[in-house]
Image (spheres, rainbow, N blue to C red):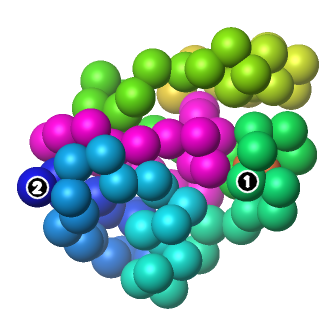
Amino acid sequence: MAKVTFKSDNKTVEVPDGAQIVQVAEDNGASIAFSCKAGVCVSCLTNINKGMENLNEKTDNEKATLEGFAAKPNQRLACQCKIMKGEVELENP
Ligand code: FES
């Protein structure tokens, strides 16, 4: 099991390894915005405060979108992120 904290909502939930962040947020009422769920629109841009190393690797698509948006190094697209292990803390930018 992994653990994710949605700091903006002051909410921590345990999830199976490999859980998809937008899905976890939706299932638990956390306030992550999203639209396309395809790594294109950037509406799900999220600050990863802790546990970046516990997320899946960025796909080429996510890398290109983040670069095009000049995202910060600690930011990921929640719709493209899976929590692979351990603990992750994130918050809305
Ligand atoms: S929901 Fe569009 S990039 Fe994540």
Picture quadrant where residue 64 is located? top right
Residue 4 lies left or right of residue 65; in this view the side is left
Name the residue type under label 2: Met
Query: In the rendered view, would you say 79 is above or below 12?
Result: above
Q: Which residues are magenta?
A: 75-93
Q: Residue at x 43, y 68 (%)?
A: 24
Residue 33 lies left or right of residue 46; in this view the side is right
45 drawn magenta: no
Place of residue 17 in the rendered image (x, y in percent of width and height, measured from the top left): 22, 48
> For the residues marked 2 and 1, what is the alpha-carbon distance in whole angstroms?
24 Å
Residue that numbered label 1 is attached to? 37
Name the residue type under label 1: Lys
91 drawn magenta: yes
10 or 64, which lies in front?
64
Q: Residue at x 74, y 63 (%)?
A: 34
User: What is the number of the mark on residue 1?
Assistant: 2
Residue sticking out furthest to the bottom: 29
Residue 37 lies left or right of residue 18; in this view the side is right
Q: Residues within 10 Å of mark 1 (few under 14, many from 20)?
A: some
Picture quadrant where residue 82 is located? top left
Place of residue 44 in the rendered image (x, y in percent of width and height, measured from the top left): 70, 53
Q: Mark 2 or 1 closer to N-term? A: 2
Q: Is residue 11 visible?
A: yes
Q: Is mark 1 within 8 Å of ligand 1?
A: yes
84 or 70, which lies in front?
84
Query: Where is the N terminus found, in terms of image quarters?
Result: bottom left
User: What is the number of the mark on residue 61?
Assistant: none
